[in-house]
Image (spheres, rainbow, N blue to C red):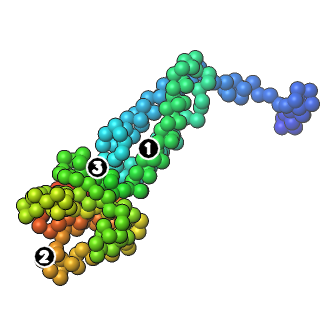
Amino acid sequence: MKKATAIIICMTGILLLGGCTNSKTNKETKANPEETQALFEKADTTLSSLEKEIDASYTDNTKEAIKKDITLAKVSEFEQELKDLPKDDFTSIEEKEKVTAYTTRKKEVTEELPALREKITNLSAKDIITRFQSEGLTVHYVQEMKKPQDFGAAPTYAKSAYIFGVEEDPFYADSEDLMDKYKNARVMTFEKIDDLNKTKSYYDELGQQSGILYSHTFGNDARFFLIQMNGDIPQETFDLYKNSLAEWK
């Protein structure tokens, strides 16, 4: 009986007032200014913290190279933090300039995160060179390997590749050709793991055929890059370069 009465009252409300009303529900849907202000301040603080974390992901202010311990998992955490920010546009907040700044910053972070993810998934040989330099490792000169001839007899599968001088070769100290003047290393990145493995195998097999042809190699299966260094360079020197990238996963 009570249910039937409620239906009749509701139908009457629809006919006369355009719908059923519930004073309690209407009251609850009204935003509480203090709660909204508190929510905004919390969101603003969270966003500031996220901005600092993202900035700290790079080696310097140029944002050309990321730190070696930044992983895709870490970027996913950043993306989740951004996603968890309130959807409220906070138009009811009186501090309009602060809200506008928050909205702008949130948009900038939204646009920056894909670029950070791309830095990891699309690592270039130049990024690796920059990492060496930021670690204080010797890079005497840098030359991009663009043409097939730049690779000599080695496979040309690399997506990007650079050669650089590690230490001076005493037998060619007076040479004007930088590639002769220094004992060199190469860094290469690949689109496919098979291409990385084939290139690494080429250098490794040369070293097995003759000690004169031996070279140090280090391949990263997670980020698809290879370091190949003149075998006359001491193992401990090679390890410095290899270990500077060991956490890039």
Q: CA distance from mark 2 to mark 1?
A: 48 Å
Q: Using the rendered view, name the quadrant where residue 222 is placed.
A: bottom left
Helix, strand or loop for disc 2: helix
In the picture, the disc for residue 216 is none
Q: Is residue 143 above or below residue 97?
A: below
Q: Nearer the viewer, residue 73 or 58?
A: 58
Residue at point 19% right, 58% down?
178
Inspect the image, locate mark 2, and give the three-letter code of the amino acid beneath it.
Ile
The location of residue 97, given as percent across then percent down, is 54, 20
Indicate which disc, 1 or 3, sits on the residue closer to the N terminus: 1
Inspect the image, locate mark 3, and give the three-letter code of the amino acid beneath it.
Thr
Q: Is residue 106 above or below residue 117?
A: above
Residue at point 27% right, 50% down?
131
Inspect the image, locate mark 1, and give the three-letter code of the amino acid beneath it.
Phe
Q: Is residue 230 above or below residue 249?
A: below
The location of residue 220, given as percent across then percent down, is 30, 64
Question: Would you name the residue on which mark 1 appears?
Answer: 78
Answer few, some or many: residues within 10 Å of disc 3's Cα (few below 14, many 20 plus, some between 14 and 19): some
Residue at point 69% right, 23% down?
27
Q: Nearer the viewer, residue 14 or 50?
A: 50
Helix, strand or loop for disc 3: helix
Question: Would you name the residue on which mark 2 appears?
Answer: 212
The location of residue 14, given as percent across then percent down, is 89, 32
Whether residue 7 appears in this view of the structure is yes
Question: Would you name the residue on which mark 3 appears?
Answer: 130
In the rendered view, does 33 fall on the left or right side of 154? right
Answer few, some or many: residues within 10 Å of disc 2's Cα (few below 14, many 20 plus, some between 14 and 19): few
In the rendered view, does 102 fall on the left or right side of 21? left
